[in-house]
Amino acid sequence: MDNQGAIDKILPPLRMIDVKNAMEDIDDLSQDFSFCKTYQSPEHMKRMIQEFLDSTQLPIIHKS
């Protein structure tokens, strides 16, 4: 069995597309963190990280 066949057995093609799209969305979210300086208030950083954890993209990747 070739590599693609093994991957298809583990993760169906449509699910792989969902995961790829979610990962690209998360990559776009990284721009939200680009302004971070060496120091940010803990409350501000905690809120930003929680928003990331609550995003719709993270569960798609986590479940895969």
Image: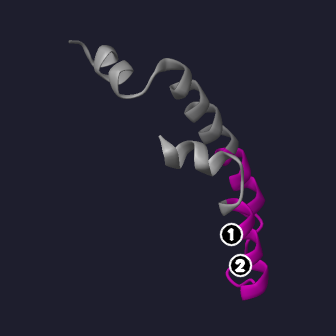
Name the residue carrying label 2: 46
Residue drawn at (42%, 27%), measured in percent from left and top? 11
Q: In terms of secondary structure, what is the magenta stretch mainly?
A: helix
Q: Nearer the viewer, residue 42 or 7?
A: 7
Disc 2 packing (10 Å; few <14; some 14–19; many ≥20) = few
Image mark for residue 49: 1
In the rendered structure, which segment of residues is drawn in magenta? 26-52
Residue 55 horizontal/vertical position (percent): 72, 54
Q: Are marks 1 and 2 in contact (CB under 8 Å)?
A: yes
Residue drawn at (57%, 25%), measured in percent from left and top? 17
Q: Is residue 7 shown in magenta?
A: no
Q: Is residue 27 above or below residue 24?
A: below
Residue drawn at (38%, 19%), measured in percent from left and top? 8
12 left or right of 43 in image: left
Q: Which image quarter is the N terminus in?
A: top left
Q: Secondary structure at mark 1?
A: helix
Q: Is residue 2 above or below residue 34?
A: above
11 left or right of 49 in image: left
What amino acid is labelled 2 in the image?
Answer: Lys
Q: Secondary structure at mark 2?
A: helix
Where residue 53 sits, quadrant-wise, is bottom right
35 left or right of 64 in image: right
Residue 38 horizontal/vertical position (percent): 67, 81
Image mark for residue 27: none
